[in-house]
Amino acid sequence: MRSETHGAITMTSDTNLSDQTDGPVIADGVDEEPVESNRRIFSGRTLLIIAIMSGLYAGFHMAALNGWSIRAWTGIDIPFLPVFPMETWNFRIVHVAGALILGFTLYSARAFPDQDGGHRHPFDILAMLAMLPALYACYTAIGFAIQISNGVMWNGIDEGIKAAETYHYGYPLVAATTLGILIGWFRPRIRGTIAPADIVLSVCGVAVAIYLITIFGTLMRNSTGTPFAPIGMSLAAVAGTALIMELTRRVAGLALIIIAGVFLIYVFVGDLLPGFLNAPDITWQRFFSQVYTDAGILGPTTAVSSTYIILFIIFAAFLQASKVGDYFVNFAFAAAGRARGGPAKVAIFASGLMGMINGTSAGNVVATGSLTIPLMKKVGYRPKTAGAVEAAASTGGQIMPPIMGAGAFIMAEITGIPYTEIAIAAIIPAILYFVSIYFMVDFEAAKLGMRGMREDELPKFRDMARRVFLFLPIIILIGALFMGYSVIRAGTLATASAAVVSWFTPYRMGMKSVFKAFELAGVMSIQIIAVCACAGIIVGVISLTGVGARFSSVLLNIADANQLLALFFAMCISILLGMGMPTTAAYAVAASVVAPGLVQLGIPALTAHFFVFYFAVVSAITPPVALASYAAAGISGANPMGTSVASFKIGISAFIVPFMFFYNSAILMDGTWFEVLRAALTAIFGVFLLSSGVQGWWVGNRAGPVIRVALIVVALFMIEGGLTSDLIGVGGAVALFLIARVAKQKAV
């Protein structure tokens, strides 16, 4: 059998899968992290050092979030050992700095070539020279800390302090950061070694953290955004912003960087722009002294990434270490594999579940899609359809409670609405989305006359049922949340339970496996932390320039003419902002730009934020920039644009559901039990009719153009949610059913 290994995932070719009729298809390693083209692969002592760094980074967060302290337990005062709880800003600064150090260590500025270049390069000498100002900036920042601890009153006016911060800290730091970034772009890459330029960037990240922790511990913290702020604060923020944007480019691509760059340019040209885009004149010093605070980088996005997100990344890493992800997929195969188009229905369940946990559409496509896409092709799905199903299902995981790819936690942080209320409100919309995808793939399978997989090709359901206890971590998580435990405590309990349930499997987790899980979590967290910090830059620009409020006024003006038009405009902006961006960043930006305007229209905060959240999520399958669809196309071998159009069609309900809960709040569990139940049932029926119309399959036969259009119209009546519209929809559906039956009898 022939297979291609990409990182830790075994991607099996079609030839391999077509030969797999003699034995069952067993998922193995579907939840493991892929190795990106610019990720370094270490060995020997370097691997051990990086593993320890990564494990300690994740372990630090678990300890800090739960208030664990060796010093408190033992009474032993160990130097440099952090004491919990940490001051909030300091914790977030360390959180970002740790991600920068790990990120620059693990990720190169560009993809690695097929063959590594030479081990020495003239740029390395330049990088070593750049190390001198980086180390000098660290040394100076430590000196500032010593002076302040000795009673020196720090301020932004004293000429001696200004000169020291400018010439001995700020300029060397900015120079080292600039050189490190530029050298990284041009130096030949060697996959098994850390480039000297990236070590320079890691040191610069440390220098930024030391200075900010030191200064924010003084009264100067209150001077941010004013002319009295120390110049060093602005220069540290310049370097820190550049480091964050460079790391985001390495781990998440250019889309977010371009958007962040546009917002940064806007800060300094906004006073020259006309109309609602006009902004006050803001000096670079004022802006950067405030952007690296809770008004920007250390604000809501980093608050969530440093608590909820990294906690659930650790949870996902423990699930991976205990092979629970493989079990999810195998259980799905055993339960749904025999149905027509079985692998597609497996993908809906398994990819949705995994996407909910790992919080990334494209990453989940690469993981579970490496198994499900070839199998879908095997049973008769066209390559673009196979890729589209996987992309739509993986994207849907971001809206599936209780975790929702960490989106629910960001929403709770921004809105102040309790997390449990958000998770409950998300239930019916998630059901509608996945029911729609199920009908879409089922009707496609019916049109093509597909079979399901044979029993001998599938895992034994009896064997899967014996291991159903592997769902316990998810059940414990949900139960703890709804019993009133905090998210932190519930996530910690679920993580511990993942280790415990592994003791009843062949993959029993001991101390080595636990440390491996923490190491994996540290690596997995880098992308989302970088993305959240970069999104914080955009949030900072919005808060400092007031462009969000002016955008809200534009929405209000549009709404005066037509409220539906205002919602359509908000939808387009949310999708546009999300294109090419990870879900978390997409929602964070849309929540800052679009959601306030919807709230001013009189829309409840929960509805408004769910509205923009949904469209930020589905931007991953919306042409022309559909990251999840493009990732799926790479596995299926189909045309990327064709795959993105197909995934858009399959996930079409996600573009309608937000309008549903706008017009009928019962969809978000806002109403009596009767209202909620009626809204859910009629909406599900409406989604069924919509899927029939889109796929052209009705009453066991292909539907003509007129019937398809009629089905879609009737579906929209059912989806609207009013009693009158529901009755019209039911009547229309009955009429179309009778017409189809008569036509079928005449054909016979």
Image (cartoon, grey):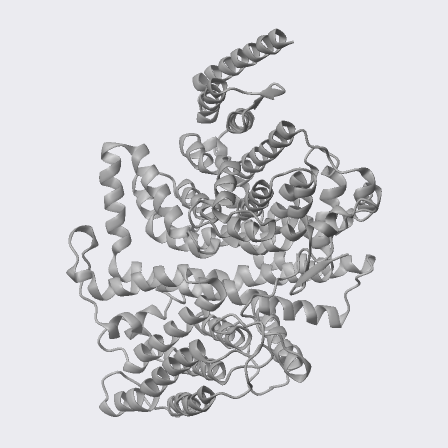
Q: Is residue 674 left or right of residue 263?
A: right
The percent coordinates of residue 89 (x first, y second) are: 43, 71
Toward which corner of the image does residue 48 lie, by quadrant? Answer: bottom right
Q: Is residue 484 visible?
A: no
In the displayed structure, would residue 29 be above or below residue 721? Answer: below
In the displayed structure, would residue 225 be above or below residue 573? Answer: below
Toward which corner of the image does residue 34 lie, by quadrant? Answer: bottom right
The percent coordinates of residue 673 (x first, y second) are: 55, 28
The residue lying toward the viewer, choosing from 488 and 525, is 525
Q: Is residue 28 visible?
A: yes
The percent coordinates of residue 185 (x first, y second) are: 43, 76
Residue at image position (53%, 45%) is 399
In the displayed structure, would residue 709 be above or below residue 167? Answer: above
Name the image quarter holding the N terminus.
bottom right
Looking at the rendered structure, the number of numbered marks drawn on it comes to 0
Name the image quarter holding the C terminus.
top right
Residue at image position (50%, 13%) is 731
The residue lying toward the viewer, choosing from 226 and 433, is 433
Toward which corner of the image does residue 286 lie, by quadrant? Answer: bottom left
Q: Is residue 323 left or right of residue 489?
A: right
The percent coordinates of residue 102 (x first, y second) are: 54, 75
In the displayed structure, would residue 483 be above or below residue 288? Answer: above
